[in-house]
Amino acid sequence: MPRLLGRKTVRYGSVTSTNLMLKELAMADIEAGTVVTATVQTEGRGRLGRKWESPEGGLWMSVLLEFDRSFDIRRIGLLPLMAGASVATAVAMEYDMETGVKWPNDVLVGGRKLCGILCEFIEPGERRCAITGIGVNVNNPVRADYAFSHQSTSVAEECARTVPLEVLENTILEELDFRWGLLSEGNFQKLVDDWQDMSLTVGKHVTVETPSGIVRGIARGIDQTGALVVETSGETRSVNAGDCQHLE
């Protein structure tokens, strides 16, 4: 079956953020599967409103996914997980790196963050869509004055060479297209198993800061909505959203 994601790609030089640009295009009824890329983002964002530095050399893109009206919106939490798994798989394939994923949306190499994901649900007109923003540090230097720079890395730093962005972009979209097919077909358990196979969070002692308070315990996996299942004080809790830290 022909690939859906990336059949139409809109490329910009400098933008505020690719998510914002794609949101405007979605409101103008652009087709599902459209990808927006930018050389530079001036207002790149991560989760919880954090700034995401997006200079030239990185891979900054957003993908428009459209759901059937019957889609169970409770499963929207699988999106950042399958996007992260797609990036981790693509980087491992192309550059022979040992990658892993951290709940809910990070891709790590050697314990340092390589990629962040930001998914946003929108309803342009009668459509139900999600914008999946993917930011990968590739050839851009991770400067010391960036927030969380001591926790970050780039493909070029790990490979000790500059790599072509278009190759990684294409492989990520191939991997994401495959997982989008699984989600669309309702094959949720395969997505769960796929993410857990490369998870750096499962089995760890974690603390998760949620809107309703701190959850501490051992991460046992994820459920079919993408929620993190944490064993704490002899019981399990499912955490749908939060800032997760590994304690070991």
Image (spheres, rainbow, N blue to C red):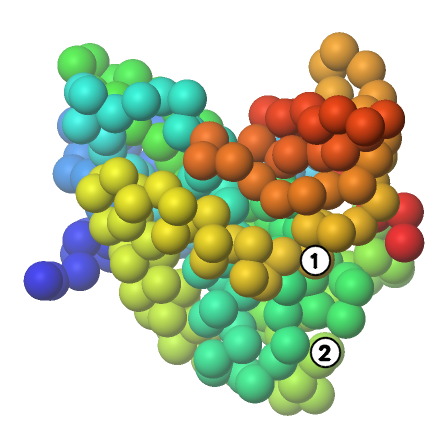
Disc 2 to disc 1: CB gap under 8 Å:
no
In the picture of the structure, the residue carrying the numbered disc 1 is: 200
Q: Is residue 132 left or right of residue 198?
A: left
Relative height, residue 94 to residue 56 (above, below): below
Q: Nearer the viewer, mark 2 or mark 1?
A: 1
Q: Decide which of 186, 18 is in the foreground and name it.
A: 186
Left or right: residue 224 compared with residue 222: left
Alpha-carbon distance for marks 2 and 1? 21 Å
Q: Residue 207: x percent and y percent?
A: 84, 34
Is disc 2 surrounded by few (<14), some (14 to 19) or many (20+) residues within 10 Å? some
**Looking at the picture, how far across and down is residue 208, in whole percent?**
78, 31
Q: Quadrant of residue 153?
A: bottom right
101 vs 239: above or below = below
Q: Which residue is mark 2?
A: 157
Report crowding for label 1: few under 14, some 14 to 19, many 20 or more residues within 10 A (C-alpha).
some
Q: Nearer the viewer, residue 145 or 148?
A: 148
Three-letter amino acid code at disc 2?
Answer: Glu
Residue in front for this viewpoint, 53 or 212 = 212
Residue at the image position 75 percent from the left and 25 percent from the top: 235
Q: Residue at x 75, y 52 (%)?
A: 203
Seen as rendered, the residue at the extreme left is 1
